[in-house]
Image: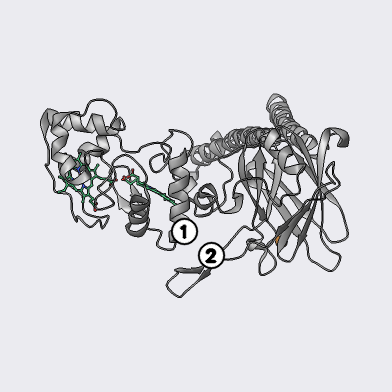
Amino acid sequence: MLEGFNTSGTVIAEHINEALVINLWISVVLFASVVLPMVYLAWKYHESNVKNEDIENITHNTALEIVWTVVPTITLFVCFWYGYTSMVTARTMPAANESITVQVEGSKWKWRYEYAANPSGFVHKLGGAFTKPVRDENGKIVQEGTMGLSALYVPVNTNIILNMTAPIDDVIHAFFVPAFRMKEDVVPGRITKQWFNAEKVGEYDVECAEYCGTDHSYMYSRIVVLPKDEYYAWFNSSDDTPKGDYGKSGDAVLQQHGCKSCHAITTDKQLVGPTLKTRRLTKEQVLDVINNGQDQLGYAMGAMPAGMASGTDAEEIAAYVAGGMKGDQPASFAACSSCHGEDGKGQYGTSPSLVSYDVDLLRNVLKHGKKGMMGTMPAFPYVSEAEIQEVAKYLEAK
Ligand SMILES: [Cu+2]
């Protein structure tokens, strides 16, 4: 699943969003101004509503004709203006001496990136195929897919120019970065260009948007936007990739499986599901489980019975758990610690941790899915154990 249109990483993306919204509203208004009167007039002048003698022969109405010519002309010029200025921003390359230029090559079925030589003369060449995961007939991964070195590393707040081409005997590809609203054909024997200036450190998906051959959809890559010092530390070295296992990090796993479309990872925002930023249960969720019990995650302890606490005790416990179990522990928590442990961490995986997204919780939630008061999380049986470990490590480190 692409991280895409809900994120915006560049000035160009902002421009294009603005143009889109303005065009959309103008279209809605123009559409309504034609269709609503049309429906009304069709009704008003329906055969059964008019008599012959009511009908007048009107040849023209100058005022009305001026209005319906001038108003749409102006509004369409507004559309044009926003489209045009966005296009100019996207198409005007920044000065080469104030930018980093990277050569991009798309070929069946991979992206390659080549940088200019660094001060010690070393040329970074990255890229390669995204290795597809191999699954057995039950959808279980028997061999993991990897990003390998297939990411493009760039510094934040810097103009990046991409000089793109494809080998002469290859096919047309299209370099598409949804979060940057950036897409351009990559054509054999021709150089096409795009530029961007990413405003936020992060990882953004790259796809091939050409849908005419078997594996364009697997031409998966990423743009990894790094803080400037990290970028230059890597660029000036002869290391393959910057420090950190970018292609297979917990963050990459969350991205690849589409977790991020339902879960915020770095903010407190509740999307479809809860944020995975910090611990985790809201007071309402804890109360809900206390009142109704729960039996769906497959822990060794089995079901959690309903009614382990009630009234002010329950309130007090819920507030304590939702607060991350900090401060003095209310005495009433004794009703819970027998199973969840004194520290709420779930006694070595025999019952759920109430304070962290540990490996056991992730594994159980992904295996069984989870239905709660926030909604339904589908099961993800094909996320591998290694990926779960990575995600837990990543969530813990934050
Ligand atoms: Cu392609």
Task: Tell me: 297 left or right of 10.
Answer: left
Name the residue at 37% across, 45% down: 357
Indicate whether 322 appears above or below 124. Answer: above
Task: Tell me: 245 left or right of 68.
Answer: left
Circle 1: is it few (<14), some (14-19), or many (20+) Cα within 10 Å? few
The Cα–Cα distance between marks 1 and 2, rounded to whole angstroms, is 9 Å
Among all residues in the image, which is located at the extreme bottom? 137
Say if mark 1 contacts mark 2, CB within 8 Å: yes
Residue 292: percent from left, percent from top: 17, 45
All told, the count of numbered labels is: 2
Q: Which residue is mark 2?
A: 144
Residue 387: percent from left, percent from top: 47, 56
Indicate whether 255 appears above or below 311. Answer: below
Q: Which residue is mark 1?
A: 386
Indicate whether 129 appears above or below 318. Answer: below
Residue 98: percent from left, percent from top: 84, 32
Callout 1, which amino acid?
Ala
| Residue 383 visible within the image | no
The secondary element bearing badge 1 is classed as helix
Q: Label for residue 195?
A: none
